[in-house]
Amino acid sequence: MHISHLGAACAVSAIAVLASLPAHAQFTELPQIVVTPNRAPTDATKTGSRVETVSREEIEEKSQPLVIDYLDRLPGINLVQTGPDGSTSTLMMRGLRKQYVKTLFDGIDISDPTGPQNATLYEHLLVGGVNGIEVLKGSQSTLYGSDAIAGLISISTLGNIEPGIHHTITAEGGSDGTVRGGYRLEGGFERGRVSAFLGGLRTDGFSAAAAGTERDGYENITANISGEFDINEDVSVFGSALLLDATTEYDGFAPPTFTLGDTEDYAEIRQAGVRGGVNFALLDGRFKNTVSAQLFDSTREVVDSFPGRFDGQRIKLDYQGSYEFNPMLTTQFGFDFERTAAETTGGVDEDATMASVWGQALLSPIEPLDLTVGVRHDEHDMFGGYTTWRTTGSYQFETATRLHASAGSGFRAPSLFELYNPTSGNPNLDPETSVSFDVGVEQRFLDGRLIADVTFFHSRIDDHIEWAAGRYRQVEGTTRTSGIESTLVYDVNEWFQLGTSYTYTRAKRPNGDREVRVPAHTAGLSAVVRPAEKWTIAADAKLAFDTIDVGGLELDDYVLLNAKVAYQANDSTEIYVRAENLLDQDYQTISGYNTSGFAAFAGVRSRF
């Protein structure tokens, strides 16, 4: 679909939905509290970093099955996928690929240690037990260490839980033989809270290869549990666990021709993570401390033309402290130790360790100004030490205008695969390094019901690691991305919310070529309407223009329109129908791989 056809589609979308921030409609009462910018609860209007959020209310309004369904609607983020649900996906943030994005699930680092690069398998994350998502943009290595060059995604299952015991049961079925269901238990008590989820997704799918005909199916069973208990007013304990078991079919490049087409290839993925710790406060609550430990284990078994097994493990110990000197100055500090190991069929059987120490000062010298300054040093057993820095600022004018800015450096440690793979590894690799900044202005109107923001961003990555001539090596040149993110959110009244977003991204590879599969222009539209007491209509659209693939191949522009109509049958039960790709767009995000056409689903959610 080319630009000439987009006008009509855009008009239909705009008339149908008007406008809203994609997967970003924040219609909660102020102040909005975010955690990721300072690793502690912070008023969003007092942070200089750009943070996007997805609330539980929004997840329930849209009822889509996967975390990536919501991430893909956020400004500055786009998703590339090699077929139906469960297919390999590449998430890009501000034009940078997923190996530059650190992802935490209830504080657990869930990146796969066995991949060519350490990266999260986003395509397998069900949204059923998720309470909220925060996306922190820009180089964040000072707070979160290696891999957080583009930013951080934090997924939480334990949020503001209402007092008492609550059960939620969901069930849905629809196109491509898709069925999913889940059970969630939540408990809110005087001295604690707990959340547990068990759910699954199964689909017959469709052919991953555009030239294929056989379906590529997917199955996923996920369980997670999290909780926190206050021993007394100064001490609390917490814990979380995640268990994921998935099987995905895909199309590959079978010999002897090695052309993409129908194959019997499949992969089995099993991931398990657990984290626990204690919070304690001293000196009348001014000196706060958190000690935690986590373990993550990942296994992939691949059955294709090059079968193999990939086993990875990560162990991490972490301490974080903060001391409030006075209302104008708080210091934060911490240290952690991490060991990562990988064993693969291809011959990798290695581990690496990294020890880190960091500190940050939170300053409010005058009431409308909030600043942070931080530094971190990481010591890796292969490439030695590396130091990063970060600073942010937010200034609030009396006119409801807020200036915000952030700048920082980051690094990505070479993966065990890049270092030690017998055929392509290079033990002499240095870390990739980055510097990034963003600056923007936020304006509020109508007592905060209308919020507009425009942010300019820029990043550069040096010492880029790339597979070339059969081996991983540092390549000359600099990866550069820059662009503009603009958003408008309007909470019109209790039954109508709307807004819009637009992102321009300019991404260049080290050799100066344009980065592939990154749309130069993306826009988002959505709205939530409650026309009657028991009815809710939610719709959203994503528009992507000007995208190229490998070899300079131009990919079609597209408009994806999704909608859901829900009826509240009684106080506890919602019945709904929803549709994806209502305009039945025929498009590809990777040349040669299919995407879903029009699909419809019906479901029910009951909470009691």
Image (cartoon, rainbow, N blue to C red):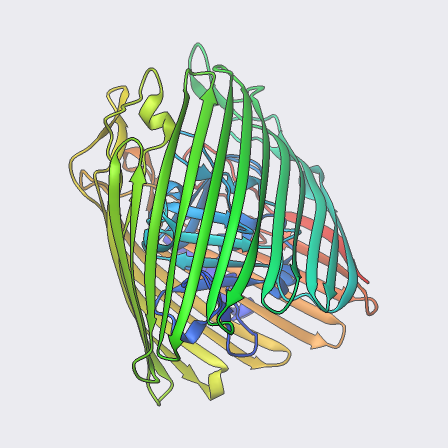
Residue 114 visible? The answer is no
**408 displayed left or right of 241:** left
For the residue pair 12 and 572, the one nearer the viewer reads as 572
Residue 55 place in picture, x, y as percent: 57, 64
Residue 568 or 184: which is nearer the viewer?
Answer: 184
Q: Residue at x 32, y 33 (%)?
A: 414
Task: Find residue 53 and report its horizontal and vertical position in percent.
Answer: 50, 63
On the image, the x and y values in percent for residue 551 come to 28, 33
Does residue 220 lie above or below 214 as drawn?
A: below
Q: Residue at 47% of width from left, 44% of height from top? A: 317
On screen, residue 2 above or below 118: below
Residue ranking furthest to the front: 283
Q: Residue 237 occupies which quadrant of the picture?
A: bottom right
Q: Is residue 303 above or below residue 592?
A: above
Q: Nearer the viewer, residue 430 or 551?
A: 430
Q: Using residue 422 as the reference point, say whether residue 124 is left or right of it.
A: right
Residue lying furthest bottom: 398
Dividing the image into 4 quarters, which one contains the C terminus? Answer: bottom right
In the rendered view, does 205 fall on the left or right side of 594? right
Image quadrant assignment for residue 227 = bottom right
- Number of residue marks: 0
Can residue 238 be seen here? The reply is yes
State the image coordinates of residue 304 (x, y, percent, origin top left).
52, 17
